[in-house]
Image (cartoon, rainbow, N blue to C red):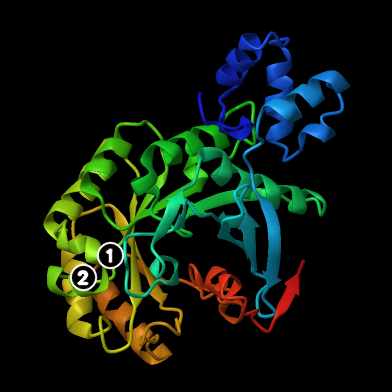
């Protein structure tokens, strides 16, 4: 348990930590419950003051604090900048849907995957997040929502970073956030997005965690995918797609393919036909995502008529597909954009709240 913070612990690990320090073991469950309500040590009112002082002095909490929030005037989407205990900054996005509130969380500070349309990766990966830091994003936003009678119902691991590149901590997070003594968000309400790491995809299939696996595909062939996603130079589509088929077969879960539409790059009818052929015979769905304009990249979304035309071709070819609704476009909703502005000390001109 060396190096871990309180939010990184499973209940049994927290109990062992208490026992090793001569603290009453039964208090561990109380502490775990308080932590998963997003409360700090000083707010654990049913603990003796002396115990709270011991915990505060002897162990890091390990969560995050909300540094800033930016609210979209278009659809109410909220983008958060979270500060970690070492003062690194990460992002999260809260999206409001009819079926509930969904939080998109980060799994790394930055990213090393190098996808050409993503601002998260421009400065590379700084470090992996601990499970408690991923959990802390959920808990801090949940506490805000609880003040208004709401709560997070769904989580998408689609923020900065590649979750399967931070495999052990991502798995620990999934077990913590779904723990029956904790915040209890069901794993079937969690989606994990990957750029395509075959070995880790197969390993995830063996974990017994029924999360929805989403593959960032973005191209129907290896040549184009290598231009958009450097990871494709290491793992070809045949290998990645077979790993996805293995995941579907092992878990019974439908796979999701994310396809960011880029004007003049991957939005032709012929590419739609090849995409439909690539996923044929698989229990899956394609999310078409008009790319957010990122000033550091010279790519833009196609016009609405071209997006609809691409979708029509997919549907005619028998592929299940929809156009994902754009959210938070006026608050730099794409991964890494707001963090990059913040680090450059360039504040976007919208509703920023301290």
Tell me which residue sits at (72%, 41%) in the image.
38
Residue 169 in the image, given as x and y percentages of width and height: 44, 38
Q: Disc 2 marks which residue?
A: 225
Of the residues tagged 2 and 1, which is closer to the observer? 2
Does the image show residue 100? no
Alpha-carbon neighbours of circle 1 within 10 Å: few (<14), some, or many (≥20)?
Answer: many
Q: What is the C-alpha distance between the residues marked 2 and 1? A: 8 Å
Which of the two residues, 96 or 28, is positioned nearer the viewer here? 28
The residue positioned 64% from the left and 26% from the top of the image is 181
Left or right for 53, reference 131:
right
Residue at point 63%, 30% (across, down): 6
- Residue beneath label 1, please? 217
Label 1 near label 2: C-beta < 8 Å? yes
* Viewer-closest of 207 and 231: 231
Find residue 131 and report its horizontal and vertical position in percent.
Answer: 51, 39
- Name which residue lies at 73% across and 37% down: 37
């Amino acid at each position: 348990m060396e190096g871990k913070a309180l939010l990184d612990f499973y209940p049994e690990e927290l109990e062992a930590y208490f026992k090793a320090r001569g603290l009453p073991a039964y208090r561990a469950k109380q502490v775990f419950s308080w932590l998963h309500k997003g409360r700090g040590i000083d707010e654990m009112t049913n603990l003796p003051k002396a115990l709270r002082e011991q915990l505060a002095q002897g162990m890091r909490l390990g969560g995050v604090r909300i540094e800033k929030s930016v609210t979209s005037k278009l659809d109410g989407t909220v983008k958060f900048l979270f500060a970690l205990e070492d003062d690194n900054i990460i992002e999260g996005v809260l999206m409001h849907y009819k079926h509930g509130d969904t939080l998109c969380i980060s799994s790394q500070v930055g990213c090393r995957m190098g996808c050409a349309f993503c601002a998260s990766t421009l400065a590379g990966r700084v470090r992996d997040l601990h499970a408690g830091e991923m959990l802390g994003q959920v808990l801090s936003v949940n506490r805000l929502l609880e003040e208004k009678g709401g709560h997070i119902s769904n989580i998408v691991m689609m923020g900065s970073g590649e979750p399967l590149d931070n495999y052990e901590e991502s798995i620990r997070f999934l077990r913590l956030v779904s723990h029956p003594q904790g915040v209890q968000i069901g794993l079937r309400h969690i989606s994990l997005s990957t750029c395509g790491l075959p070995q880790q995809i197969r390993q995830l299939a063996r974990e017994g965690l029924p999360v929805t696996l989403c593959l960032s595909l973005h191209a129907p062939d290896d040549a184009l995918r290598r231009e958009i996603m450097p990871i494709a130079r290491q793992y070809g589509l045949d290998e990645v797609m077979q790993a996805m088929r293995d995941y579907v077969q092992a878990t019974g879960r439908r796979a999701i393919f994310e396809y960011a539409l880029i004007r003049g790059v991957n939005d032709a009818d012929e590419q739609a036909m090849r995409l439909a052929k690539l996923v044929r015979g698989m229990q899956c769905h394609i999310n078409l995502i008009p790319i957010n304009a990122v000033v550091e990249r010279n790519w833009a979304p196609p016009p609405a008529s071209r997006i609809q035309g691409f979708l029509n071709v997919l549907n005619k070819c028998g592929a299940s597909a929809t156009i994902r609704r754009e959210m938070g476009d006026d608050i730099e909703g794409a991964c890494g954009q707001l963090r990059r502005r913040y680090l450059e000390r360039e504040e976007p001109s919208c509703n920023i709240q301290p």
